[in-house]
Amino acid sequence: MLDPTPKARVLIGKPGLDGHDRGAKYVAQVLRDAGFEVIYTGIRRSPEQIVEAAIQEDVAGIGLSLLSGAHNVLFKRVIDLLKERGASDIVVFGGGTIPPKDIPTLTAMGVKAVFTPGTPAKRIVETLDTLLAQPA
Amino acid sequence: MSDSNLATNLKTSRDKYDAAVAKTLAKFPEQQKTFVSASGSPVERLYLPESDPRAAYTEQLGFPGQFPFTRGVQPTMYRGRFWTMRQYAGFATAEESNQRYKYLLGQGTTGLSVAFDLPTQIGYDSDDPESLGEVGKVGVAIDSLADMETLFDGIPLDKVSTSMTINSTAAILLAMYIVVGEKQGVTPEKLNGTIQNDILKEYIARGTYRFPPKPSLRLIADIFEYCTKEVPNWNTISISGYHIREAGSTAAQEIGFTLADAICYVETALKAGLKVDEFAPRLAFFFAAHSDLFEEVAKFRAARRLYARIMRERFNASDKSCMLRFHTQTGGVTLTAQQPDNNVVRVTIQALAAVLGGTQSLHTNSKDEALALPTEESVTVALRTQQIVAYESGVTNTIDPLAGSFFVEQLTDRLESEAKQYIEKIDAMGGMVAAIERGFVQKQIEESAYRFGQSIDSGERVIVGVNKFTSKKEPDIDLFEVPEATQKRQVDKLKSVKANRDANKVRAALSAVTEAARGDGNLMPPILDAVRAYCTVGEICRALEGVFGQYTESFN
């Protein structure tokens, strides 16, 4: 890293009804430690609320965390809403209880990175450093 | 030999040992500078008797089935009967889940444990926009009594005990279970089972709340009161440390926060006019079993002793009300997506911890649950794991076999004392509701989770297959999938139920629920009537919400 400060703004969101947010909170803290500015939405937010918050807060990336199995539907809804709002430049990544076979589906709909359980924090930070690199 | 001579002797031998250790360490240092438990607490090289254990025996340990229940809640424990083997299950619609229950009963489970989907748990119907993507995903979708009738079709409710993981909507699902019983000709006093009904830990850790704390606690007190009279064998609550631990707490926090929740429920019921010995014997608990075997065994023993003391000292309860009976589930967060077969071994250690700790019932996780809901095959292995512990390991032949271990006893003492300190802090804040509203409990858990995560990310704590002994090979594993058409099928069924019920009865029943919510009478009778009229979970919740309002987590 040539310029470690300041890094991008990121929104960590929990779409749908799933209340398991240990992972979301951990990733939020790890990203803060790495110099990102992080906003965490809290649990049980609708895709509409998440997209609205992302646009309001002018974030560069949205990280979606879901452990309930509803990722194929809810991640897609977030991406569709971003398109509708002309905000497709916001990078979407995600994580949670996601079967390997769903990852290509998520990638195809525009999710830029999927971090499943056990992903080292370092790899998440490195991936986001690349995905959210600020123009010099 | 006198006690002081013994102590001097021990001291001399100890000094000799320490000198020998110092020599060894000079040549062969230990693998780590400090050794810590899964909860991050220091673990000594060797534990010695701190005092003559016989002196404190009666007070600290006592006998199984007797106060303070450190060694177990029954006089014969597993020599009389094994724990209930209960696998948490449910997915898609009631038809599929009914098939899974019948399969599990055929394989030797001795109790049912119902997993509901998130819309059912929070009180949204399957056609509600809030339910998008979630119908039938983490459990079975139940919209009305019609689904509940299907769920227990061919399962006689007087022959099986059923545990239901349901909290903010517990009153409604319990009402449905009672009515299914009526339809099978089983009267409420013959029903056996448990509802989780523990809303406080939903605000703390699990997230399926719907109403604010005050009306939620009223619903709980109403259930206590109703069941005391009408469903006497029902466990009216399962006060849960499991989700607190899953969210990242330490073992001591798991006990401390769970018992602080218990104190709040007991106080709520007392305020509602109930007598402690009427309802307290039906309070049950639910803990996690993680992989640090001795810490977990000590945790269960410490929880039993501390609860017994609290119930006697604070509430003047009878010994029967002082018994902490608990269900255990192996630790979901300890499962790894990498090398899933390794999870079978983790679950075995955790199941052993639960049994050595004296659990009353046990769910063993399946190896594929870091990736998806379990397949029938992996559930079978999980069930077999506890059957092997029960029938082959021999650990059930005697009661509380680790008692008297210097390590386990000192660990039990320490966990009890640490948990007690958390309870004192929460008391000082004005009780659990205040502590939650302040974010104290959530923050404590979050910090522990962060420390744990960092210890893995730094490599200080080894997780086999994750940060050591890793493999490039992707797991070759067939995963379970909830059928694509679930939501549509469930919504179609809901439509047909709505088309075939008596609309006037529905309207009247829902107004009665609203009326009762405004007043201070028991909510169970009007909810039972609403359920009988095939009102949906969503409709009944909206009626309650109209009076109670909705809870939203605040962030700072």
Image: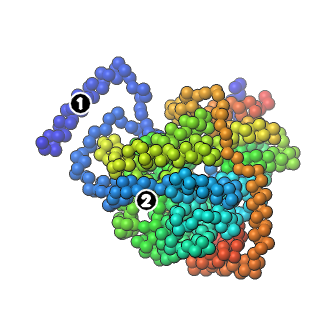
Q: Quadrant of residue B549?
A: bottom right
Say which residue appears at 55% left-offset and 56% top-offset: B105
The x and y percentages for residue A133 are 76, 31
Residue flagged by tag 2: what amino acid is it? Arg
Nearest to the observer: residue B405 or residue B60: B405
Q: Would you say residue B519 is visible in this rendering?
A: yes
Q: Which residue is mark 1?
A: B15
The x and y percentages for residue B271 are 48, 74
Q: Quadrant of residue B377?
A: top right
Q: Label 2: how many residues lie within 10 Å, few (<14), some (14-19) or many (20+)?
A: many
Nearest to the observer: residue B436 or residue A79: A79
The chain letter under disc 2 is: B
Q: Would you say residue B457 is visible in this rendering?
A: no
Question: Which tag is nearer the camera, tag 2 or tag 1?
Answer: 2
Nearest to the observer: residue B233 or residue A87: B233
| Mark linked to residue B325 | 2
Q: Earlier in the sequence, mark 2 or mark 1?
A: 1
Say which residue appears at 17% left-offset and 40% top-offset: B6
The x and y percentages for residue B443 are 55, 50
The x and y percentages for residue A33 are 62, 36
Residue flagged by tag 1: what amino acid is it? Asp
Q: Label 1: how many residues lie within 10 Å, few (<14), some (14-19) or many (20+)?
A: few
Task: Left or right? Give the position of B106 relative to B505.
Answer: left
Q: Give the alpha-carbon distance from disc 2 to disc 1, as whole Å.
A: 43 Å
The chain letter under disc 1 is: B
Say which residue appears at 71% left-offset and 34% top-offset: A128
State if disc 1 and disc 2 touch (CB < 8 Å).
Answer: no
Give the quarter of the figure containing the N terminus of chain B: top left
